[in-house]
């Protein structure tokens, strides 16, 4: 299998691979699409964040059919091997085809996520022989760092009730639901007092962690909450614990694997160890099948010269003991999580404690419920609650005209369409938030290794999926 640049979708994949396009660096590729639209005489819109929408009129006889939106993101994740010299601001992606007919990049991410979607749209725009209703091709930015491009789209730009997202799914698979998200920042101002007591650090280690969308239903331990649980149970017995520092988690959208909590107490060290051991053993038993390498290490450390009051410390330990976390709801129609919260990162900066919590839900109502729960709970323990960057989910709907069209196109080739759902966030959810009765499918060629240097695109599938996509458009009557 060669990478045949006489095929339009291959030609455009190569063209955009030559343009550096990491997230927040999309101006050049965005301008490329704009110039393409100008050269082809298409109406286009480029907004202030560099999203581009290009309109292609209906082919003959399709003028009166409901328009279709196609959508893909222009940005890519920039990862490389340590020993590879590559400047993601300047250098083109170095493409090659391996022995199995897979397109790959030498030493870097390939960017087929979501380069294949961008290439498909440009190929469709460039081919006047195709049959289809009026098309709006939507090229978004900053998908990989939080769906920010899609969030900037305005409802008045969009003229259709049908959307084909070209970023997820596969050659024989479409996504039917995704979750929305709300990033919440919970904070509390801290007042320190001098300390004369012994100081200890509890370290939670050995947990698996994972992306908080895909693994939230797997009973994995959350280091922040497990460490806080030990502290609350110690304080319940000894009453004099004072918090010095707490630090855990790396990413707001991952389950934290480690936490360090430093505190002071006058309790006898043996007594303290015995009680801590008791709670740690309970947790170990609870996690024996899901997170068997869990461990907690309590050690005496250098005496801290300041700590919070016992009352403030108690508030914080209790808050982290009662805050809802983890899986809240599963769908009874699909085998998938549809509502969850996950405490991701905790730290103290400038005498303020911060906790990053991520709420995910397919149904807006579940999101509203969890947000309200935190809003009520936080002030009871002296915390402030702030919600940032909320976007809506895409709840499953049994009926979808587009899905039936795709199903029939595949059936003619003897392929059965598979359906799948994700608890992660997709740009589809943002479109659904703007147009509540939007019909959506996702469609993509076979690829793997997204966001890593082993990212690859199956070239055979790249061709077949393009053919199927054009057939779907032809059947959008
Ligand atoms: Zn993507």
Image (cartoon, rainbow, N blue to C red):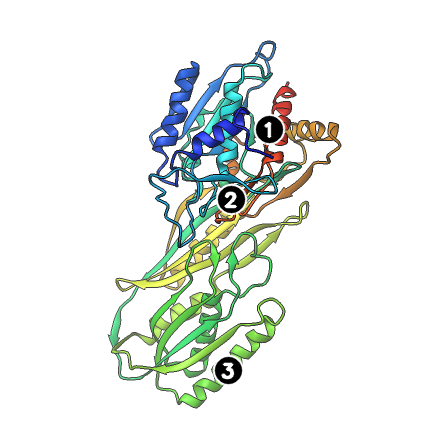
Q: Nearer the viewer, residue 448 or 243?
A: 448
Q: Nearer the viewer, mark 1 or mark 2?
A: 1
Q: CA distance from mark 3 to mark 1?
A: 59 Å
> Contact (CB < 8 A) between labels 3 and 2?
no
Res 303 quadrant in image: bottom left
Residue beneath disc 3:
277
Dot 2 surroundings within 10 Å: few (below 14), some, or many (20 or more)?
A: many
Residue beneath disc 2:
425
Element at badge 2?
loop
Dot 1 surroundings within 10 Å: few (below 14), some, or many (20 or more)?
A: many
Element at badge 3?
helix
> Can I make out residue 87 in this image?
yes
Return the disc, 3 or 2, that comes first in the chain's sequence: 3
Q: CA distance from mark 3 to mark 2?
A: 39 Å
> Contact (CB < 8 A) between labels 1 and 2?
no
Q: Dividing the image into 4 quarters, which one contains the C terminus? A: top right
Return the disc, 3 or 1, that comes first in the chain's sequence: 3
Residue 466 is labelled as 1
Q: Dividing the image into 4 quarters, which one contains the N terminus? A: top right
User: Which residue corresponds to the image point at 51% horizontal and 44% vertical from the top-left?
Assistant: 425
Q: Is mark 1 within 8 Å of ligand 1?
A: no
Dot 3 surroundings within 10 Å: few (below 14), some, or many (20 or more)?
A: some
Residue 355 is labelled as none
> Contact (CB < 8 A) between labels 3 and 1?
no
């Amino acid at each position: 299998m060669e990478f045949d640049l006489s095929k339009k979708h291959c030609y455009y994949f190569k063209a955009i691979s030559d343009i550096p396009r990491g997230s927040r660096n999309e101006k050049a590729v965005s301008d490329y699409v704009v110039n393409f639209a100008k050269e082809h005489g298409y109406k286009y819109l480029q907004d202030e964040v560099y999203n581009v929408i290009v309109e292609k009129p209906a082919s003959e006889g399709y003028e009166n059919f409901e328009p279709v939106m196609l959508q893909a993101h222009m940005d890519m994740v920039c990862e490389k091997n340590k020993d590879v010299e590559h400047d993601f601001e300047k250098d083109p992606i170095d493409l090659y085809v391996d022995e199995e007919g897979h397109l790959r990049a030498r030493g870097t991410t390939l960017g087929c996520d979501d380069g294949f979607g961008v290439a498909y749209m440009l190929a469709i725009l460039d081919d006047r022989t195709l049959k289809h209703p009026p098309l709006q091709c939507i090229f978004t930015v900053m998908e990989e760092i939080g769906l920010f491009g899609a969030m900037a789209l305005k409802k008045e730009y969009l003229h259709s009730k049908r959307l084909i997202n070209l970023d997820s799914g596969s050659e024989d698979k479409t996504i039917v639901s995704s979750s929305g998200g709300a990033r919440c920042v919970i904070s509390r101002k801290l007042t320190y007092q001098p300390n004369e007591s012994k100081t200890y650090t509890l370290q939670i280690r050995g947990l698996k962690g994972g992306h908080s969308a895909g693994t939230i239903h797997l009973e994995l331990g959350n280091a922040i909450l497990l460490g806080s649980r030990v502290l609350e149970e110690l304080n319940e017995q000894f009453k004099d614990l004072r918090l010095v520092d707490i630090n855990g988690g790396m990413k707001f959208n991952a389950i934290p694997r480690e936490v360090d909590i430093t505190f002071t107490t006058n309790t006898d060290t043996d007594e303290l160890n015995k009680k801590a051991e008791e709670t740690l053993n309970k947790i170990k038993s609870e996690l024996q099948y899901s997170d068997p390498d869990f461990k907690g290490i309590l050690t005496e450390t250098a005496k801290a010269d300041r700590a919070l009051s016992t009352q403030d410390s108690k508030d914080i330990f209790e808050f982290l003991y009662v805050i809802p976390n983890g899986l809240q709801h599963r769908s009874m129609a699909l085998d998938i999580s549809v509502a969850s919260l996950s405490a991701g990162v905790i730290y103290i900066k400038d005498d303020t404690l911060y906790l990053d919590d991520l709420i995910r839900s397919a149904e807006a109502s579940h999101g509203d419920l969890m947000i309200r729960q935190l809003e009520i709970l936080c002030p009871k323990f002296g915390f402030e609650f702030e919600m940032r960057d909320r976007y809506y989910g895409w709840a499953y709907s049994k009926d979808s005209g587009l899905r039936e069209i795709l199903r029939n196109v595949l059936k003619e080739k003897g392929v059965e369409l598979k359906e799948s759902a994700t608890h992660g966030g997709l740009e589809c959810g943002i479109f659904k938030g703007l147009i509540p009765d939007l019909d959506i499918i996702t469609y993509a060629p076979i690829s793997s290794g997204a966001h890593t240097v082993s990212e690859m695109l199956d070239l055979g599938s790249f061709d077949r999926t393009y053919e199927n996509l054009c057939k779907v458009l032809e059947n959008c009557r």
